[in-house]
Amino acid sequence: MAKRLVVLDFDGTCTDVEAEGIGFTEAVIKTLVTVTQHNEGDIRDLYERFERRLHDEPGVHGMRYGDKIVAPAMVDPYLRSGPIAKWVLETCGIRTEPEDILLRLFIGPLYRYHYGFSSTALRPELEHFLETLTEAGLPTVVVTNSDTTNVRRKLMTLQSESARNLPIYGDARKFVLGDLLDVSELMHIPGLERPIYLRRPHYFAVLRDLLERYGIQSYDDVIVIGDIYELDLALPDALGCHIGLMVNAHTPEYELQHLKYHPRSRVLYSLTEALNFIC
């Protein structure tokens, strides 16, 4: 049997993202209060109103890179915060053009600051999941957009060596688009009017380097588990990896339908199901 590699997203895949994101959202709201100089109650009302708007129009709004949407916005608190912050600022009379430093802060350095307020809400079966993969001799890594320090902090709350020593590749910038000849530029899936952009060179570089590091001969020997198809799985899918979508209450229906009859994928509702898919 060829050597295989397991690649895990972190937030939403290894964690209960809604529970861990409560502190993050509160930090974003407090920053918006400071920036706008508006009453906290009013800002909170605006935030909740715009959050409902995201859920009502799942295929329309998203996380943007330049003028392109690169991930759905409603799937988790982290992705929701960008467009919501933009709407709140604009409603309060603050300009948010692309050149505006304030908006960039909400998806850049200030995002990392807010992420530091997220709580630790690891999936209860995570420790057993990682121990089982270690015992099976399957190299397993985390590839995440988040900062490695905060991810490591959360994993260190577990007792097993498999969890505490799990390799983490942070700041993967899965959302960054650019030149990449190895895959088609975009794809269309039923139920989503806009395209999904596949050329994400920073994410590709991480995956390519992992194959070299672990001596993996083919993308067919890589299994990627993530909770957002467009952000975590579309590029690995295009490269030929096996993919598992970790579903939550806000997973877009079009992603579920796209993977329903996909030959190299599985829709997952727990890490126990992910273990069965991998092994």
Image (spheres, rainbow, N blue to C red):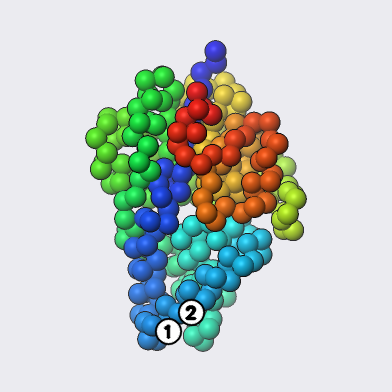
Q: Is residue 237 left or right of residue 15?
A: right
> In the image, residue 244 lies at what x, y percent?
56, 37
Q: How many neighbours does mark 2 have within 10 angstroms: few (below 14), some (14-19), or many (20 or more)? A: some
Q: Is residue 182 visible?
A: no
The residue that disc 1 covers is 42
Q: Is residue 106 left or right of residue 68?
A: left
The residue that disc 2 covers is 46
**Within the image, what quadrant is residue 18 found in?**
bottom left
> In the image, residue 277 lies at what x, y percent?
53, 29
From what the image shows, is residue 121 above or below residue 78?
Answer: above
From what the image shows, is residue 75 above or below residue 123?
Answer: below
**Within the image, what quadrant is residue 261 found in?**
top right
Report helix, strand or loop for mark 2. helix
From what the image shows, is residue 172 above or below residue 49?
Answer: above
> In the image, residue 14 lies at what x, y percent?
41, 43
Residue at horizontal 52%, vertical 76%?
49
Q: Amino acid at mark 1?
A: Asp
> In the image, residue 250 lies at what x, y percent?
54, 56
